[in-house]
Amino acid sequence: MTLHYQAAVLNEARSSLRVETVAAAPLAPSDVLVGVRAAGLCHTDLEVIDGSLGYPMPIVLGHEAAGVIEDVGSAVQRLKKGDHVILSWNPHCGHCYYCDRGLPILCEDYLAKGPQAVQFDGTCKARHASGEELKHLMFLGAFGEYCIVPEQQAIAVTRDIPFDRASLIGCGVMTGVGAALNVARIGRADTVMVIGCGAVGLAAVQGARLAGAAKIIAVDIDADKLALAQRMGATQGVNAKKEEIAAIARRETSGRGADVVIEAAGSAAAFRTSIEAVRPGGELVWLGKIDINTDVTFRWGALMQEKRIRRSSYGEARPARDFPMLAQAYLDGRLMLDELITQRIRLDAINQGFSALRDGKAIRSVITFG
Ligand code: CXF
Ligand code: ZN
């Protein structure tokens, strides 16, 4: 019998999402049916809505989610009905050139199929009532009551973490904490600067704290976000509207510059500031993004002196290793997630949720189901 459920569908860019009844595809042997319980609204979803990121339509967005396994395909081995899971948006084949070199984020199959907005086996897992196929953003499409994904994308975690907090681990938190714990090599005496205190930047501040950094300088233009960064582990907050950021980095490090700078603001100015603020031989991790066709200029001298620049899209996530670890860190009180949720909304309020994100009013709005 076909499963019907409610999902928010984007039929064309620069239009509102519409909550519609859709039909699920039959479960393939290696797929699981996830009952989505919480899904966060991320900037990448917003870029698709606003048309700066082109995807085929109609599409179901949503790629930061947690839920419950409702059914499993005949070949599924690791998961069972009732398991609580956080979803990963980086399925990978495990045997291509890049997977062999420890870079699942560059998996050839993942990169080839991502822009087609199909699931990892090349098919779509939901249809409109009209019979038209629905695409899925980032191999998930979690803005609906259900979501069908291959087993590898659903990571079982402890039942003790609430779904709304767990959902954040699937994208923003993983990216920020991972930048500090997996990508940068933060030493105990290090000074780390985090530029941009949205969900990803606040997670990076916490990652720097977990890595044992001595000083953590949080940078933003919003006083409330700076105050939150300080509650989360920043040793100081700096308002980029009022202060010269690179000068602060030097002042705090006997003139050298920060050992590690994590950029999570996503502006040309932030990219430029980040390279000016890092010390010679220091590490820079760029997480933010701007339109891919935009040129960014740098002062050449700032790029010299053995500085190491890394771009990371998912904080070198290893979801099966990292999601349970992050869930436990939350339960132990070492990772603050409650404060990242500005509002909880129902699926039919999704367009207001995106307006709040567009206006910079929300760190995270989370849709809750059930
Ligand atoms: C993005 C980062 C840039 C590549 C696509 C995914 N992360 C989360 O939304
Ligand atoms: Zn995201």
Image: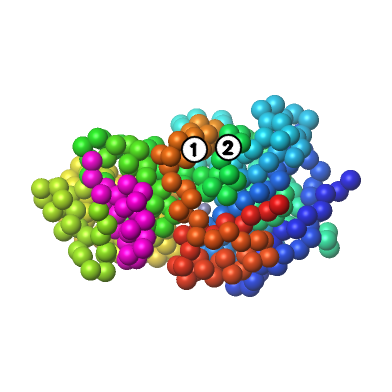
Q: Residue at x 83, y 61 (%)?
A: 129
SS for callout 2: loop
Q: Earlier in the sequence, mark 1 or mark 2?
A: 2
Residue 176 horizontal side relative to residue 118, left or right: left
**Which percent across, then down, holds residue 343?**
54, 61
Mark 1: is the Cβ under 8 angstroms from ligand 2?
no
Q: Residue at x 36, y 56 (%)?
A: 228
- Asked which quadrant contains residue 53, the reply is bottom right
Taking depth in this image into account, of 154 and 89 the one nearest to the observer is 154
**Which numbered dot is residue 331?**
1
Q: Is residue 286 above or below residue 51?
A: above
Q: Residue at x 20, y 42 (%)?
A: 281
Q: Give the magenta part as a residue range.
A: 214-235
Residue 63 horizontal side relative to residue 357, left or right: right
Look at the numbered discs 1 and 2 and tell me whether their residues touch, using CB distance below 8 Å. yes
Q: Is residue 55 above or below residue 79?
A: below
**Which percent across, then down, holds residue 75?**
75, 29
Mark 1–mark 2 distance (CA, rounded to whole Å): 8 Å
Can residue 180 be spotted in the picture?
no
**Which percent across, then down, holds residue 44?**
52, 58
Taking depth in this image into account, of 67 and 187 the one nearest to the observer is 67
Q: Which residue, given by chain and number where applicable, does mark 2 sit on?
A: 160
